[in-house]
Image (cartoon, helix red, strand yellow):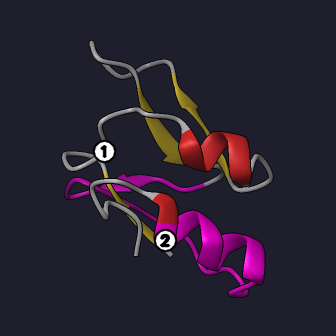
Amino acid sequence: MKLNKEDCIGCGSCVRLCPVHFEWDIESYSPVKVKIKGAKLKKGFYEKEVELTKEIEETIKTCPTKAIR
């Protein structure tokens, strides 16, 4: 799973739907955005190997900017 930090607008839908894998990136500058738990930021992307579950698929679909892949 990948999350493009630049495309993220910080709406928080992923944090609400899938708090096991997503959390607020309180270290980011205004506006506060989201990150994948346990993932390192590399070239503007958070990336982590996870099993694709229905919960994650639904979370990806609800991202308004398609920042999650």
Q: Position of residue 46 (x, y in %)?
A: 41, 58
31 up-or-down from 18: above or below: above
Q: Amino acid at mark 2?
A: Lys
Crowd tier of the residue under label 2, counting other residues whose Cα lies within 10 Å: few below 14, some 14–19, many 20 or above: few
Q: Percent position (x, y) of residue 40?
A: 47, 53
Task: Please tell me which residue lies in front, 46 or 18.
Answer: 18
Classify residue 67 by image quadrant. Answer: bottom left
Q: Residue at image x 66%, y 72%? A: 56
Residue 29 left/right relative to 16: left
Q: Which residues are magenta?
A: 39-61
Residue 60 is situated, as x and y percent measured from the top left of the image, at 50, 69
Indicate whether residue 44 is drawn in magenta.
Answer: yes
Marks 2 and 1, the one that precedes in the sequence: 1
Residue drawn 61% across the image and 80% down it:
49
Instruction: Out of 34 and 57, give the one closest to the viewer.
Output: 57
Give the residue at mark 2: 61
Per the model, the C-alpha gap separating discs 2 and 1 is: 14 Å
Task: Give the residue at the far top of this rendering.
Answer: 30
The one nearer the camera, 15 or 4, is 15
| Residue 27 located left or right of residue 6 | right
Q: Is residue 22 left or right of residue 64?
A: right
Q: Residue furthest bottom?
A: 52
Q: Quadrant of residue 42?
A: bottom left
Instruction: List x then y, in percent, for residue 62.
Output: 49, 60
Specify the label residue 8 is tagged with. Answer: 1
